[in-house]
């Protein structure tokens, strides 16, 4: 029967090559994507620097300037409004995909568009981000670079002959390479791609990611120097005496991350309710930004220098307070208005200021604590964004790569996981996935080894399946099924054996109905109606492999035979058995088993003699 005929293994015309050969090809493509993303990151940072220098200082320069001491005066309002107007026009007449901070858009392309990103996005996203940031937008360049690098990877994957899964890896390689080229943090970039884009840890994805980020970081070394984007002086993390204070900071950062995320989407909801076209929203955001920047110019631009200044303890409490309050405010308003820019740098700035403020407050109350504001700023920076994005591991490694100080590991790990615990309790979605959830897309940000790849067929198969002789007639089998023979009615497929008990074939309900509908006068045996050479599974085979075999060949059940003798029947694998593997995992996760303490207590109660009644 056609149900059991094995099709050509070359799905979608993909050449039937070994997994290793495909991985080698993918790795070569990843190296190309990494180099491209490295140059894209440099060009975008240079373009932001050029526009910022022209607009705010009327000079030519490619390095991103500190906009705190700009010379525009009140004209800054005009500049930020015009920048918003340009972005609004680009979003309406170019593509709306330029809106947002980049990472959710890359996630959306993976989830609903099979990792396909339009070439228009590849061109307009970096341009729109450069204009938005160059005219004072309080954003970072990393989000747009991540999306643009991902777009390059996707375009290469669309141009060449690859699978959708390989195209996803190339997209992630471009995104990770963009981050690595921006901050010179290749390890954190790899983990970011795994935590926020791929949700898998396989050689197929890990090896190309490492190659891409290595190449991108090499480009960073050649074009922007060997040091990281953020310059950090040596810090005193105060371990172990400072651990109690790090515990408190973790709670504060977690609560702050929850409020920060909710506030961002609250402002986005406000703009959604405006009775004007969305094209004008970025201009309104620019107006608010310009007004605030008149009084607090430090809120303008990327602010990489401000982040370094906070970590190096260069600012007083008043400046730190203004950053936490006003940088957050202008970010919520401008990003909520639908403009183009990254979320990473401004959140780093706010999180670092929060951590430094905490250390200063503790020192004011307990002078003997002598906490380092810079150390707590670094930890707060990683914890706030890690908790908000549910990418905690990424930003533990990110902060470590910035300092390259092993003493930072313990406080980073402790504060970041406590902050994430708070965020998990009070946030259903992360700051990255909330936007997608509102569009009806559910992103599962946790991943684990598939139980199907940990259980063998022998663990779940039916070891004593009902069988029928190859000489049985279809009419006889139909009669037994009609009489509700439990051995036969509970299965959609029945195994056919010869007189020696060896596997002869398999017959399904569909096969039986087909013969009965034909109303043949001559008797038909089950072997003639069924499939003589069915697909089989083996006891030592993983359920995952057997399931793939079933799906690729559109069958719902497999006889299980011995490796040594392909006709020696040892079991039966159906859909119910496969679900049993999943049930085992569910049982492990949900059923609370009694521990030793409960066992001892129960044993003590059972041996206790009842007191005699008076």
Image (cartoon, rainbow, N blue to C red):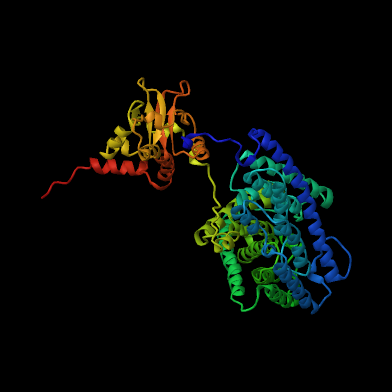
Nearest the viewer among 307 and 552 is 552
**Closest to the observer: 541 or 392?**
541
Task: State the image quarter where residue 56 is shown.
Answer: bottom right
Q: Can the viewer see residue 401? A: no
The count of marks equals 0
Taking the spot 46% from the left edge, 30% from the top edge, the residue there is 534
Q: Residue at x 64, y 69 (%)?
A: 336
Q: Outermost residue toward the left?
A: 614
Where on the picture, by quarter, is residue 518? top left
In this rendering, the answer to whether 356 lies above or below 155 is below
Where on the picture, by quarter, is residue 131? bottom right
Return the x and y of residue 103 as percentages of the image width and height.
Answer: 65, 57
Q: Position of residue 259 (x, y in %)?
A: 57, 66
- Residue 213 visible: yes
Residue 361 percent location from the top left of the image: 63, 66
Q: Nearer the viewer, residue 252 or 26?
A: 26
In the image, taking residue 233 as reference, residue 392 lies left or right, namely: left
Would you say 527 lies left or right of 367 here?
Answer: left
The residue at 70%/67% (across/down) is: 91
The image shows residue 59 at horizontal and vertical percentages of 89, 68
In this view, the residue farthest toward the front is: 521
């Amino acid at each position: 029967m056609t149900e059991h005929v094995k099709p050509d293994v070359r799905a979608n015309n993909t050449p039937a090559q070994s997994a290793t050969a495909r991985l080698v090809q993918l790795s070569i493509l990843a190296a190309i994507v990494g180099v491209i993303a490295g140059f894209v990151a440099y060009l975008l940072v240079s373009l932001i620097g050029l526009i910022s220098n022209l607009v705010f200082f009327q000079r030519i320069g490619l390095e991103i300037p500190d906009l705190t001491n700009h010379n525009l005066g009140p004209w800054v309002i005009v500049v930020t409004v015009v920048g918003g107007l340009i972005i609004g026009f680009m979003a309406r007449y170019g593509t709306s995909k330029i809106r947002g901070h980049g990472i959710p858009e890359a996630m959306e392309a993976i989830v609903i568009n099979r990792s396909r990103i339009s070439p228009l996005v590849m061109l307009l996203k970096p341009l729109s981000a450069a204009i938005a940031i160059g005219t004072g937008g309080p954003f970072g360049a990393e989000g747009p670079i991540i999306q643009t690098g991902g777009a390059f990877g996707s375009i290469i994957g669309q141009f060449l002959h690859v699978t959708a899964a390989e195209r996803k890896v190339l997209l992630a390689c471009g995104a990770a390479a963009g981050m690595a080229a921006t901050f010179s943090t290749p390890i954190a970039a790899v983990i970011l791609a795994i935590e926020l884009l791929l949700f898998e840890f396989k050689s197929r994805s890990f090896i190309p990611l490492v190659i891409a980020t290595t190449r991108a970081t090499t480009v960073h070394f050649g074009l922007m120097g060997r040091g990281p984007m953020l310059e950090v002086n040596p810090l005193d993390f105060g371990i172990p005496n400072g651990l109690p204070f790090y515990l408190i900071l973790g709670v504060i950062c977690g609560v702050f991350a929850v409020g920060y995320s909710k506030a961002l989407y609250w402002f986005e909801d406000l703009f959604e309710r405006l009775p004007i076209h969305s094209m004008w929203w970025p201009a309104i955001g620019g107006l608010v930004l310009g007004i605030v920047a008149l009084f607090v110019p430090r809120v303008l631009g990327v602010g990489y220098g401000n982040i370094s200044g906070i970590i190096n303890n260069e600012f007083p409490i008043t400046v730190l307070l203004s950053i936490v309050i006003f940088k957050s405010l202008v970010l919520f308003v401008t990003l909520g208005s639908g403009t183009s820019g990254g979320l990473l740098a401004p959140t780093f700035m706010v999180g670092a200021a929060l951590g430094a403020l905490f250390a200063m407050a503790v020192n004011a109350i307990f002078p003997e604590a002598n906490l380092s504001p810079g150390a707590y700023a670094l930890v707060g920076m990683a914890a706030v964004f890690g908790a908000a994005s549910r990418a905690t591991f990424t930003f533990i490694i990110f902060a470590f790569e910035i300092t390259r100080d092993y003493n930072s590991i313990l406080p980073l790990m402790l504060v970041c996981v406590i902050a994430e615990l708070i965020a998990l309790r009070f946030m259903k979605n992360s700051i990255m996935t909330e936007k997608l959830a509102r569009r009806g897309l559910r992103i599962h940000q946790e991943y684990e080894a598939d139980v199907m790849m940990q259980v063998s067929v022998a663990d779940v198969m039916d070891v004593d399946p009902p069988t029928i002789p190859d000489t049985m007639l279809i009419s006889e089998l139909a009669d037994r099924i009609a009489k509700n023979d439990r051995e036969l009615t509970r299965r959609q497929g029945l195994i056919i054996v010869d007189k020696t008990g060896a596997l002869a074939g398999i017959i399904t309900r569909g096969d039986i109905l087909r013969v009965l509908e034909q109303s043949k006068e001559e008797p038909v045996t089950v072997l003639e109606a069924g499939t003589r050479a069915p697909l089989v599974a083996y006891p030592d085979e993983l359920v995952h492999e057997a399931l793939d075999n079933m799906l690729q060949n559109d069958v719902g059940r497999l006889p299980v035979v011995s490796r040594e003798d392909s006709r020696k029947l040892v079991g039966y694998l159906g859909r119910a058995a496969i679900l049993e593997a999943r049930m085992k995992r569910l049982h492990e996760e949900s059923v609370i088993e009694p521990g030793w303490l409960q066992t001892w207590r129960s044993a003590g109660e059972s041996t206790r003699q009842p007191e005699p009644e008076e």
